[in-house]
Amino acid sequence: MARPILMPQVGQDLTEGKVVAIKVKVGDKVKKGDIVAEVESEKATFDVEAFETGTIIDIRYKVGDNATVLQPLMMVGDEGEVASAAVQAAAPPAAAAAPASPPVTHATMNAPATAAAVTSLHADAGSGRSSPLARRLAREAGLDIRQIPGSGPGGSVVMKDVEAFRQSAAATATVLNFAGAARAQPPGDDQVLKLFAEGSYDLVPHDGMRKTIARRLSESKQTIPHFYVSVDVTLDQLLALRERLNTQAPKDADGKPAWKISVNDFVIKAMAMALAKVPDANVSWTENAMVKHRHADIGVAVSIPGGLITPIVRKAETKGLAQISAEMKDYARRAKDRKLKPEEYSGGSAAISNMGMLNVKSFGAIVNPPHASILAVGSGEERAVVRAGQVVVVQQMTITLSTDHRCIDGALGAEFINAIKGYLEEPGLMLV
């Protein structure tokens, strides 16, 4: 009997992945755990394993296709079995799959349940039979018949179900508009392109990563009230300690040092210890409760071709500088090869974006939930400051904390960033 090998869902936001390699062909024998395909998500590349032992009897996609999550990539059967019409019907191609649910935003979380949300509780009914009239009415109304719960015989969708669903959807849209959740849409593609002379530009289609970044950060700025605080940090003691630690690193037979600690490693450690010192800032927001984290899991933005990814240093308050440095080097290397696992870049309570190496003096970063804050780090530079009435030159950098004002208000944000500043200016406190 034919069994599907499904496109796995790795990460809650993934709705489809690009097939970059097919490792088998029809007729090949596979056993449970064999790698049968390689798929690229918006942030990483991962292997797809066979779930059962058998013979490949059907391959649903070719390299370059986008595969919908939880839909069959290929079918496994018994030796000699062929992909019959029944098999095809049992494993519809991804193109026929129900559309992915829209992303959950702060607005939709507060709004009354939508018709689509309600019908998700009745998926079995909505995927059953429907009358020709119901299908025609749904098509004319621009509705997906598979999303409509049926009340007819055997759960089939009939005319009154379509009408009820249409009215419910219209009522929900009215409520959302009244609540202010419906926002002005940006100009469409045609409107933008009309502003430029034909032939004066090239179009580069967005890949999955760029689309995900655009969606998540647009949601963040629209639904999260951002609050910003900045301080200047004097780096003289940190730079001196960094030089001493790196100079004393033991070397292997090839002369390679056991560690090479960066300023960013100190920033990660300082933020983690500041979260331990100011635990009210180590939180995530939900509509019903404040999530208070027991450890400081720090996301660190890493630039990769086509966008960025934020691997998480788990329990960073418990780790030494050398361990943090080694983890970040490993994350950065694998991130550029798109080999990070979803659990390595998902979650976290706070984040760091460091553009100091790009000669950026200061900037404000965008909070990316579930993080409640993100620290933007500028470049270190010599600055003239006045101390005891005398002008002296010191190494300083500007750091800016962006917070989700729903859970970290101004006074708490100021306490948090000054705790970070304190550890960076007295770095020896991070070693005790």
Image (cartoon, rainbow, N blue to C red):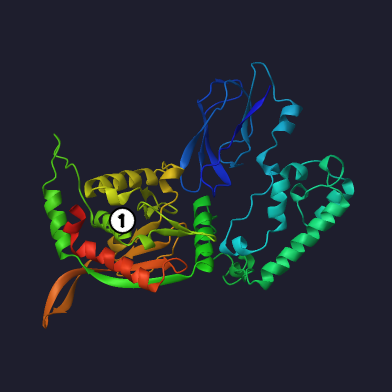
Name the residue nearer the viewer: 80 or 322: 322
Q: Residues within 10 Å of mark 1 (few under 14, many from 20)?
A: many
| 186 lies left or right of 167 | left
- Where is residue 37 drawn, in percent x and y? 53, 32
**Residue type beneath disc 1:** Ala
Looking at the rendered image, the quarter that the N terminus falls into is: top right
| 427 lies left or right of 106 | left
Please tell me whether residue 247 is drawn above or below residue 113 in the rendered image: above
Instruction: Note whether residue 110 is visible.
Output: yes
| Residue drawn at (74%, 49%) of the image | 147
Name the residue nearer the viewer: 231 or 38: 231
| Residue drawn at (45%, 49%) of the image | 346
Q: Hey, which residue is sitting farthest bottom in the picture? A: 389
Name the residue nearer the viewer: 427 or 79: 427
Number of numbered discs present? 1
Circle 1 sits on which residue? 272
| Residue drawn at (65%, 71%) of the image | 179
| 223 lies left or right of 174 | left
- Where is residue 297 drawn, in percent x and y? 37, 52
- Secondary structure at numbered mark 1: helix
